Image (cartoon, helix red, strand yellow):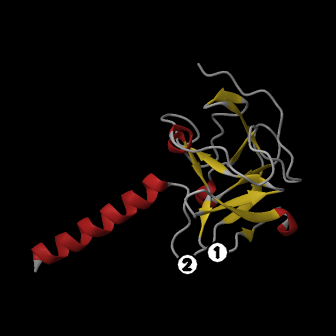
Amino acid sequence: MRLGLRSVVLGVAVAAAAAFAVGASAAPGVAPQLSVRGSDYGNVLFGPGGRVVYLFAPDHGAKSTCYGTCARFWHPLLTTGSPVAGPGVKANLLGTTTRRDGSVQVTYNGHPLYFDNMTGESNTLGEIGCQHLNVNGGIWLIVKPNGQPNMANGKTHE
């Protein structure tokens, strides 16, 4: 019986690690909730888990241009349902777009949303590590509650 319990615990741990590795997906059957929180850059949009969401300046309209290596470093915020407007979020600005692989990505004011997945950057609750960063073919910006990109320059890393 101990072996069976260990296998179940290991299976749950592996499933949790896989979900974290994807990082951007909502749990099956659960729509992601976005919220507005204060930061060093003023009020900005945060996704599930209290992680800041970014937009990619090269995206035009609701279509993502971040695929391949870009999407490995910048996970799209994916959903299997309608995204939920949490505190401070304007429900009429929430939407979705279908990616080339058929997955559904959350948008805000027509901007596809992403999480930073680069090692050492924006990986903890409330951390904003990649504001105004030019990488993977364009500029990454946090999002204001009105749906506009926050154009403030990022903080320098030490």
What secondary structure is marked by label 1? loop
For the residue labelled by badge 2, is the local secondary structure a helix, a strand or a loop? loop
Residue 121 place in picture, x, y as percent = 56, 35
Task: Find the distance from the CA under tag 2 to the CA under tag 1.
Answer: 7 Å
Report x, y in % for residue 116: 58, 42
Q: Mark 1 and mark 2 in contact (Cβ < 8 Å)?
A: yes
Percent coordinates x, y for residue 46 in the rendering: 70, 54
Residue highlighted by disc 2:
29
Q: Tag on residue 66?
A: none
Q: Position of residue 75 (x, y in %)?
A: 56, 49
- Apparent side of residue 15 relative to residue 26 in the rendered image (left or right): left
**Type of amino acid at the residue the image marks with label 1:** Gly
Residue 67 or residue 111, whichever sits in front: 67
Q: Nearer the viewer, residue 100 or 80?
A: 100
Residue 98 vertical placement versus 113 (above, below): below
Q: Quadrant of residue 79?
A: bottom right
Question: Residue at the location (74% across, 38% down)?
Answer: 58
Q: Amino acid at mark 2?
A: Gly
Rendered position, 96 above or below 118 = below
Nearer the observer, 99 or 90: 99
Q: Residue at x 69, y 52 (%)?
A: 113
Left or right: where 76 falls relative to 19: right
Which quadrant does the N terminus fall into? bottom left
Say whether disc 2 or disc 1 marks the residue closer to the N-terminus. Answer: 2
Q: Which residue is mark 1?
A: 81
Question: In the visual, does 57 lie left or right of 48?
Answer: right
Note whether 63 is above or below 5 in the view shown: above
